[in-house]
Amino acid sequence: MIRATEEDRELTTSSSSRATWPSLHVSSHPLVRHKLALLANERTDSKTFRELARELTTLLIYEATIDLPLSEFTYRTPMESTTGTKVAIRVGLVPILRAGLGMVDAAADVLPKASVWHLGMYRDEASHRPVSYYNRLPETCPDDLVIVLDPMLATGGSAIDAIRVLKEWGARWIKFVGFIAAPEGVAQVAAAHPDVSVYIASLDRELDENKFIRPGLGDAGDRLFGTYGGE
């Protein structure tokens, strides 16, 4: 049995990676680690994969929103009047199509008043560069915090371009939430957008020659939607 000790948490987060990329947050929660292993297992079918993706998203959103500002308000319990707190800012969710769609419902459950905007990007198989094909953002950004949702942070190209678009749109505070990342992608995002915090379940070993994360979990979009034979 592996016990989740404080020492174990330090190893999971990796002090060296935090020193290199201060904006990187790798979850040390035992449930996140447990569910990620199930998610990545090649024997996990699409239905179970979607369920695990929702559960992981919920846990990661809790961690990513730990610093939301609050304001006080007065309300009544069945017994008396009292004072409580509520989230004091507007939050927007931006899933990067298509794999980010597997995270948006769970994120919206945690943040039911959040706006949901969509950006569509795919990776060109020859150049490995991101290609934008869909943008439904309104003219101006109405949100104080925008959370980008994408299960994978591989080369970092899609995340960098999405964050650039959001900044040009007027987003002032941006976070990225995903399941796994490669060191190469984290480095690229940190260099391009050092002000953007990245929350993930695992920092994997590397990108291979085809720019896939290793050990990774395969193509998140295909596994979410059962499209192993193509789009």
Image: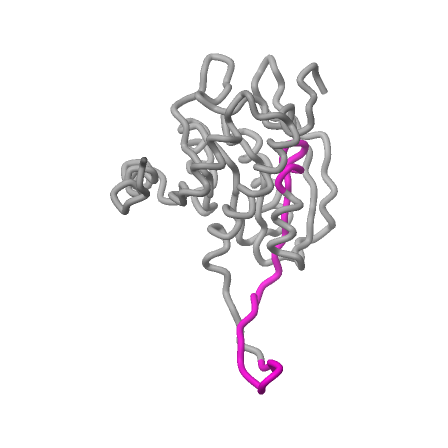
> Which of 158/85 is in front?
85
Q: Residue furthest bottom?
A: 80
Q: Residue at x 46, y 30 (%)?
A: 37
Left/right of residue 37 with respect to residue 15 in the rendered view:
right
Q: Is residue 212 above or below residue 149?
A: above
Q: Is residue 10 above or below residue 142?
A: above
Q: Quadrant of the C terminus?
A: top right
Q: Is residue 114 above or below residue 228?
A: below
Residue 101 position by quadrant: top right
Residue 112 position by quadrant: bottom right
> Which of 122/224 is in front?
224
Q: Residue at x 58, y 82 (%)?
A: 74
Q: Residue furthest front?
A: 1
Left/right of residue 72 with respect to residue 45 in the rendered view:
left
Residue 152 at x, y percent in the picture? 53, 31
Left/right of residue 51 with respect to residue 212 in the rendered view:
right
Residue 24 visible from this viewpoint? no
Residue 135 at x, y percent in the picture? 72, 38
The magenta stretch spans residue 100: yes
Residue 38 visible from this viewpoint? yes
Residue 154 at x, y percent in the picture? 50, 27
The magenta stretch spans residue 35: no
Part of the protein shown in magenta = 74-103
> Which of 62/25 is in front?
62
> Which of 9/86 is in front?
9
Residue 203 at x, y percent in the picture? 41, 32
Q: Quadrant of the N terminus?
A: top left
Residue 128 position by quadrant: top right
Q: Residue at x 57, y 48 (%)?
A: 147
Left/right of residue 8 with respect to residue 57 in the rendered view:
left
Q: How many marks?
A: 0
